[in-house]
Image: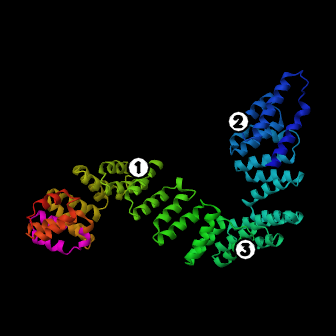
Amino acid sequence: MKRFLAVVCCFACAPLCALSLDGESKREAKLFNSFLSSVYALRSNDAKAFSKLQKTLALQPDSKYLKRLLVSAAVADNRPDLAAEYADFISSGENTADDWSVYGAYLWKKGDLAAAREAYQQALKQSDDLRIMFQYVTLLSGMEPAQAAAALEELASGEPDFASPIYTEIGNLFLQRGDLNLALGYFNKAVEAAPLDPAPRLGRGEVYEKASQYFLMLHEFEELEKMGFGNAATYSRMGSVFLLVKDYPKAEEYFLKAKADDNGDVPSAYFLSLLAEQKEDYARAAGYLKESADYQTSASKWLQVSFYQNKLNRPEESLKTLEEAYQKFGGNVEIGFFYALALNDAGEYKKAARVLKGVLQTNPTYTEARLQYAFTLESLKKYKEMERALQTVLEEQPENAAALNLYAYSLAVRGERLDLAQEYIARALAVNPEDNSFIDTQAWIYFKQGKIAEAADLLDALPDELAERDADAAYHKGAVAYERGEWEKARKYLELSRRKNKEAAQLYKRLPPR
């Protein structure tokens, strides 16, 4: 940057001979002031620099130098279209190396690579400026890597002080092209030219990594560490290698080193959270993700944090995380889906329905979301809308067992169209005959049909663990036992379900006293 500013300063002085400041010419004074304002704008990267240069050119329309500055500024802003009307500076008078290099950069940005190469060759005939050489070689690397390498090697032989970075550039060129052997050869030359230069050793480590020679890669990065050049990037990559060979303590050691060097290092935060999860240390896993540099922009990390909070038995905290994420990421579909699940778990069915409706408007083919929407509508007793949602799913996936079961269960709960309910649950069981929730639905249909013995046989076969975690299943067991006059059995299951199930609470009150 310092060199660039020095060049600008020199150019700023160049036209002074043509700008008289003797006070006799207002036009010349105005031109000088306008030019000076443009130069200051360029120095400070002011967004108005281009427009200031245009105003200056309007005062001296034939200025080759001002046109070149405009082309250079437009190219720097990645707007070659703005440079087009000023690119004719190259046809005005004699051209310097800087004229040709700016024109070459313009042609390159336009995509005219052949003409750009010729322009850079013209520049190099007049100057051995390393900056122009590197631009030229970078251009060649996109066209003829062998020619680029030859040009760079010639430069290295004439500039021994720059040999290591030049050989490193050649190595990077072939590394990008996937020619690992040639890349390794040039990185070796770079290390030989400057043994303490970290760049070629890093390149050599990348070659070993791409060649799956992980222990050689580790050795290279360990050498960098000994030289004092270890950093978050190398440490996290070393940790990844130790993960591959399942040396988890060593992996964690290096990921922690990466974190110590850069607390927000993204790869180390991700892997440290996985290692903490493996130890069931969910609080630490969530903490690592929250400290990651990309946490504020990564919807998936917010989801993962909410998962860890659930694992810590903090459902309210998990729900709050999902709510914030849903607002933060503008209704992200995946966030919305899991947010709705958490709302359903919290019994906030109206809010869950609104969220799921929004998810489906964004992604109408999201079957799992439509199923959850149907479940939510069933909980809200909006049965017609629920049935429309399930019919949409079944039109696309006639054997979707979860949809068939929900449809059958809803009909059974209402005591409506029990023949249709039986048809649907039979289809669901045909897909998954061992699903306990499907068996529970079949038992409840039997109960509603008055087939108490058949219902009891199925419910007795279900494990008590299901009743302990599912209030509806516990209610079904209790209701069937009640119908059979098995009061203590009924009391056991109704006691489990009455705090979450209104029907269970009402039936519990009707039990005869002990």
Q: Position of residue 356 (x, y in %)?
A: 35, 51
Kindly state the secondary structure of the residue where label 3 is placed: helix
Disc 3 marks which residue? 223
Q: Is residue 77 visible?
A: yes
In the rendered image, residue 444 lying in the magenta stretch gets the answer: yes
- Which kind of residue does numbered mark 3 sit on? Glu
Q: Which mark is residue 48?
A: 2
Is the C-beta separation of discs 3 and 2 under 8 Å?
Answer: no
Left or right of 240 on screen, residue 435:
left
- What distance separates the C-alpha of mark 3 from that of mark 2? 48 Å
As shown in the figure, which amino acid type bears the numbered disc 1? Thr
Task: Look at the picture and state if 26 lies above or below 68.
Answer: above
Residue 362 badge: 1
Against 13, residue 141 (above or below) is below
Which contiguous range is marked in magenta?
Answer: 442-467
Q: What x and y, as percent, mark residue 279?
A: 47, 72
Given this view, does label 3 or label 2 mark the residue nearer the observer?
3
Sequence order check: which comes first, mark 1 or mark 3?
3
